[in-house]
Image: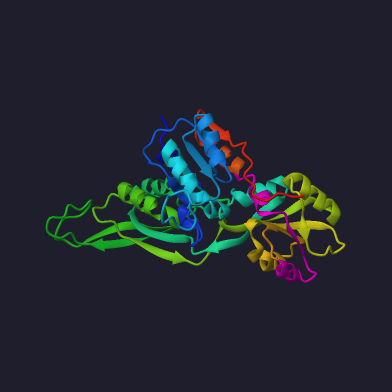
Amino acid sequence: MTTLREIITALEGTAPLSLQESYDNSGLQVGDPEMKLRGILVTLDVTEEVLLEAEKHGCNLVVSHHPVIFGGLKSITGRNASERVVRMAIRKEIAIYSGHTNFDAVYGGVNTYMANRLGLVDQAILEPLGGQLKKVVVFVPHAQLELVRQAMFEAGAGHIGAYDSCSFNLEGKGTFRGGEGSTPFTGEPGKLHQEPETRLETIVPAPLLGKVLRALAKAHPYEEVAYDIYPLENTDPSKGMGVLGILQDPMEEEDFLALVKDRFSTGVIRHSALLAKPVRKVALCGGAGSFLLRKAMALGADVFLTGDVKYHQFFDSEGKIVLMDIGHFESEQFTRELFYDLLMKKFPKFAIRLSETETNPIKYY
């Protein structure tokens, strides 16, 4: 039977918790990682109604985008919505797991699903993250090079954009002398030894560093493995906020507004002044993404689509871009499908349901 820990491993393998913003609280909210699961309900928000829906369908795990514990609980007495949800979840033995800004920060995540709804092509991260890559350098005897290299690749090393199995090799000679009690792979204890070695270099995503190093140590023949780790400032094209993409066929601004309204089923679209020019390059960010407006403008986007735009932020478009606010819920509603698709791919025979409970707190008149 599938355990909660297996689900957590699958979710965090796609979007590691290390990618979440400092203010966030993604991860396991309620529950025991070793609990056996009967079914999963995926939702945008966790409410008491969602927990009742989960119970009705025999699901003892709710996977949500928004964390139910965001600030911090000093008590669980039912004084507010978060406390009531946590109390009910514990009483009914329903676990809650939330994937929030970590799923905003990966290609294939929340913003990719938004872009796909609009049919955007040539998609790329709008603001790629820096500091997410490490270079690992290890020295390996020639005969064991492929074994070590492949072990590192299988653990997640060597990916650059759309390419995998990326490495650099330089041949040379290593020297070492084993001390008392050592059992060297080659050479004799107490004697200086020279060994033909290959300097193997490859790229490793920071969240996978530990896994790659364990694979390296297991595959390497030496008793003491010599390796270096270098922090890189390169941006990671698969990690970051927002998406920039292209419409296959340029559209008039009014037609694009109609497309957005249809694809996101939004009650209203708040926008800055239209510029009377076709829309071709589209930037977007789910949730409150107005912090990316300048980036979208710098990259020549015709429109920037997001939610939670404040009054004065509309002035920042400066007649150079059309800023569109479709609403927080509307921009992130397809996160349910994101979780569903991810989990069904990894657990195709498990009971996973899309929540049918309406959780948008904002109504339109």
Q: Position of residue 42 (x, y in %)?
A: 55, 39
The answer to whether one can see residue 204 in this image is: no
Image-quadrant location for residue 335: top right
Q: Is residue 317 magenta?
A: yes
Q: Is residue 224 left or right of residue 14?
A: left
The one nearer the camera, 66 or 146, is 66
The one nearer the camera, 100 or 190, is 100
Q: Is residue 303 left or right of residue 20?
A: right
- The image quadrant where one finds the N terminus is top left
Q: Position of residue 334 (x, y in %)?
A: 64, 44
In this picture, is 189 found above or below 336? below
Q: Residue furthest left?
A: 180
Q: Position of residue 346 (x, y in %)?
A: 50, 36
- The residue located at (43%, 65%) in the rendering is 231
The magenta segment? 311-335
In this picture, is 50 found above or below 317? above
In this picture, is 240 found above or below 41? below
